[in-house]
Image: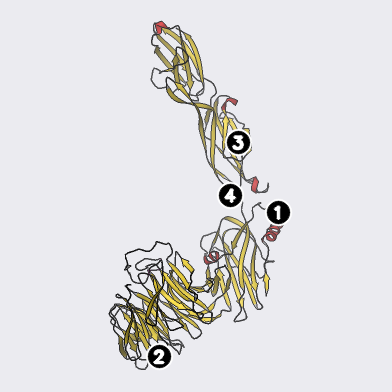
Amino acid sequence: MKTKYILGGMALSLLLLVNPLAAVKVKVIEKTKFNDFQKGSFQNISVGRKGLLTLGPKFKPVAGPAEEYYFSLGVGATGDIVVGTGHNAAIYRIPAAGGEAEQIYRGDQIDVYALLVEASGDVVAATSPNGKVIRISAKDKKVTDVFDPEGRFIWDMKAEGAGNIICAVGNPAGVFSITPDGQVETLFNPEDAHIMSLAIALDGSIFAGSGDRGVLYQIKNRKIKVLYDSPLDEVRSICEDRDGNVYFAVLKNIAAQRVAKEFELGGVFRKSRDEEKTEIKEKSILYCLRNDGNTDQLWSSEEEFIYTLHYDKTMNAVVMGTGNSGRIYRIESNGDYSLFMESESAQVYKIVGSANGFVAVSNNTASLVNVESGLNSTGTYFSEVIDNRLQSRFGKITWNADLPAQTTVQFSVRYGNSENADSSWTTWSAPFNDPDKSDLNTSGYRFLQVKAALNSQSPNVTPILNSFRIYYMESNRAPLIKEIATMKIKSEEGKSGGESEKLMDKNLRFRWEVNDPNQDNLLFHLYLKKVSDKGWLQIQKNLQEREFILEMENYEDGKYLLKVEADDVLDNSPTLAKKSSLISSPFLIDSTAPVIRDWAQNGTSTRFLVADETSAVSRVLYSYDGKEWLPVFPEDQIADSKTESFLVTFPDVEKKAFVFIKVMDEFDNYRVYQKEL
């Protein structure tokens, strides 16, 4: 076996050598994990828990009857497939050689949830609700009654080695044994409302799973034992491997829940015991009860329901069917798993073994597939449509694969600028066979999709694709400054007339929002000018913060503009670096206090003007001692202009020789005058 690989660092170095003017940050699209590959789609491919892609087993769709649901399944010794349906309680036989499905029974009940195909070819089927177990003769389709239980639902049937039929019933629950001559024995009447699933163990004991409390029972020598009390509601399916390990799937009550592809299948069952089980997030869990008595959780999902389990002897693994994505998994006893089929139907509802593999039925919509144990000779993986956010230049595609003799892995890529791979996209590239010679050398596209083809000339050997990478560089886009906010800075508190007030700092704070499409690190250059000036003065260079404090006392009073320039040179070569700028709204710089003009006294009244060249007069205060300050108001009672007129009669003016006047503007520039009264 040989391994084809290329180191990420080597690929990065090569890409930089090919394009020395490229941006510093080369990015990588990488697929290495199960969840990465699961986003894509598969044709004859299996993807494992560790993210390994291999050729999957062969499967072939089988033409089934035109019925709404397939609820039960059996495979005869000759390879004929028998399907029980709902909601018409019909049973069909499909010849092993193919051809049209033949209806062999239609009853007056609604559903056929369980059936067996005996060695003679006779079909034993169970109808629900309020149905019976019947036998349909292979020779003449004659129907005879086998068992008429008290329970309304017959959920499962299994054949014992001695020829007995074990029957699981619900509402009320029970497990019954039916002998070949029609004798019925009650094996178990649990407190549960339903027994949903059965399995016959290697030692002849019976496993039974309840449908409202999620309990796994063992019936051995007519004695009942609880093997596991699960945290979920229903033991849906049970199987045992050749080593005596028991696998059982438990799931939350799923009836009447609407799903994307249609709706769930199953009945609504209330728990029959008072205590509620601890709420957990998982919708379904697969357990393995080891032959040493320990129970392990092998698989769980918050999204998928496990509908059916089957132990495949040739693979020595459990095959698991789920919904609502219609998936079939292979589960190893050590917990490793692989996904090898995703049906177009929502739920893989039942899996039954056949001579050379197994048969699976799915619902929403109803379909049948025959899966063989051998491997496909070819298989294809398609990635999801990958969005690079920006048009990009693509370098190499590299991969890591184990290639036994007579196996290959090939990659192709296609590109577009629309979210859906439509006719505007490119065609698939010529296949790449060698990761050392795989330069895509393509630019100008935002979206891409990857196709990996696995091939083998040997029926029992598969290539193994471990991972792949695509190196790319986004087209550099200029940063965008969205807004510049200007804020006056509040500083220490002062006192005036016993009232607390905020004094203004002699600074302005500027903050700006900026977005860089490439998420580059940015430098900012700041420029200042008066509105009336032509040229700009650079006041800050290579600022990395997105705010700046301007000390107003360093500049002449007046109306100004601030220009912020964003530069992405930190992450791009000088030839590819881009800049953009934004100019703020006009703002005032005012470091000069107002002045008092035209002071005049007329008896006890005093008239004067307060004026500021740049900003509005905000407050005027008076004091007789320079300690306690009290307000005076302009003649129009509102201080909101650059010049305000005051007419004041100071209290006790006859007794005072001097008055102190403090005049302030909206930037808290102030000056104190001492006036003789």
Disc 4 + disc 1, Cβ < 8 Å: no
Q: Amino acid at mark 4?
A: Gln
Task: Please tell me which of labels 3 and 4 falls first in the chain.
Answer: 4
**Label 1 is placed on what type of residue?**
Pro
First along the sequence among labels 1 and 3: 1
Residue position for label 1: 20
**Residue 234 against residue 501 in the figure, above or below:** below
**What's the residue at 34%, 88% (across, down)?**
135
Q: Amino acid at mark 2?
A: Gly
Instruction: Give SS at disc 4.
Output: loop
Separation of disc 1 and disc 3 at Cα? 31 Å
- Which mark is nearer the camera, 1 or 2? 2
Q: Magenta residues, as a range?
A: 258-267
Which numbered dot is residue 121?
A: 2
- Residue farthest to the right, as pictured: 17
Please name the predominant secondary structure of the magenta segment in the image.
loop
Q: Which residue is mark 3?
A: 526
The residue tagged with tag 3: helix, strand or loop?
A: strand
Q: Is residue 125 magenta?
A: no
Residue 316's spot in the image, x, y percent?
53, 79
Which is more toward the observer, 371 or 380?
Answer: 371
